[in-house]
């Protein structure tokens, strides 16, 4: 068919022969190239499968990296919360310890002033340099010096003869007084430790008088 087409085009037999020969050579070369570059279907399918697996692996890796980043962020947040909680706990503990120490110091100082015969421990305490007074167990450090100086300069603030032990109930009366409470919290039948403390806080002398009337002598009243 090619030769007939070339003859109809007016080519000479020699030209037709050369054209057909060139055509055959071109077909052979094209076939050779096609065979060399041919990929079997099985190989093609294998490549497609591997490509799909690789794509899935990359997606999984990206997802793992995202999860790792998220979990790292959560860990950092948790670590910060834990650090803040520890710091707050330490601050609260220090504040509580300082408050307890101040409370203990104030109570020890009030008791010492009461025993020293202060008529109004709160008023006397206001005249002391409390910052220079320390507490060692049940003992006050730097207190006696200030107390003696205050007794000299403002003796009217203290009862004559010192503290609670300076006065004794009248003999034979058992320390009774018409103005004393009807129910004595120091007596066995009406014993009430809370009321004892309340009376002692308001009027230490009354507390000692009621204790004497009840025939008892608590160590904390001495």
Image (cartoon, helix red, strand yellow):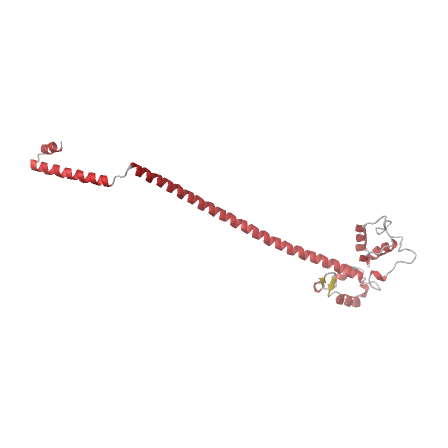
Residue 77 in the image: above or below residue 104: above
Residue 12 is at least partly visible in this image? no
Q: Where residue 70 sits: x, y (%)?
A: 48, 46
Seen in the picture, residue 31 relative to 177 is either above or below; the reply is above
Q: Residue 151 appears at what percent x and percent y? A: 79, 66
Q: How many numbered badges does the structure rendering display?
A: 0
Residue 144 in sight: yes
Eyeballing the image, is 157 above or below 215?
below
Q: Quadrant of the C terminus?
A: bottom right
77 horizontally vs 52: left or right: right
> Residue at left 67%, top 56%?
97
Q: Where residue 35 appears, x then y in whole percent?
A: 23, 39
Residue 170 lies, with reference to residue 70, above or below; the image says: below
Nearer-the-camera pick, 75 or 204: 75
Q: Relative to 11, is 80 on the left or the right?
A: right
Left or right of residue 209, residue 28 in this image: left
- Residue 13's x, y, as percent? 7, 35
User: What residue is drawn where x is 50% and y is 48%?
Assistant: 73
The image quadrant that residue 160 belongs to is bottom right
What residue do we see at 73% from left, 58% from top? 106
Looking at the image, residue 169 sits to the left or right of residue 18; the answer is: right
Q: Quadrant of the N terminus?
A: top left
- Residue 140 figure quarter: bottom right
């Amino acid at each position: 068919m090619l030769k007939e087409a070339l003859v109809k085009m007016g080519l000479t037999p020699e030209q037709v022969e050369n054209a057909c020969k060139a055509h055959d050579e071109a077909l052979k070369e094209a076939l050779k190239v096609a065979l060399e570059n041919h990929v079997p279907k099985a190989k093609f399918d294998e490549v497609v499968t591997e490509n799909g697996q690789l794509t899935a692996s990359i997606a999984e890796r990206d997802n793992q990296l995202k999860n790792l980043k998220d979990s790292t962020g959560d860990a950092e947040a948790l670590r910060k919360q834990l650090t803040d909680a520890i710091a707050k706990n330490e601050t609260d503990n220090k504040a509580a310890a300082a408050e307890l120490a101040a409370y203990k110091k104030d109570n020890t100082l009030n008791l010492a002033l009461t025993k020293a015969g202060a008529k109004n421990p709160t008023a006397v305490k206001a005249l002391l340099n409390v910052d220079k007074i320390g507490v060692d167990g049940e003992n006050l450090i730097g207190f006696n010096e200030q107390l003696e100086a205050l007794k000299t300069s403002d003796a009217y603030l203290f009862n004559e003869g010192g503290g609670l032990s300076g006065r004794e109930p009248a003999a034979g009366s058992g320390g009774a007084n018409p103005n004393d409470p009807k129910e004595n919290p120091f007596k066995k039948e009406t014993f009430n430790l809370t009321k004892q403390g309340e009376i002692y806080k308001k009027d230490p002398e009354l507390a000692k008088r009621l204790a004497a009337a009840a025939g008892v002598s608590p160590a904390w009243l001495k």
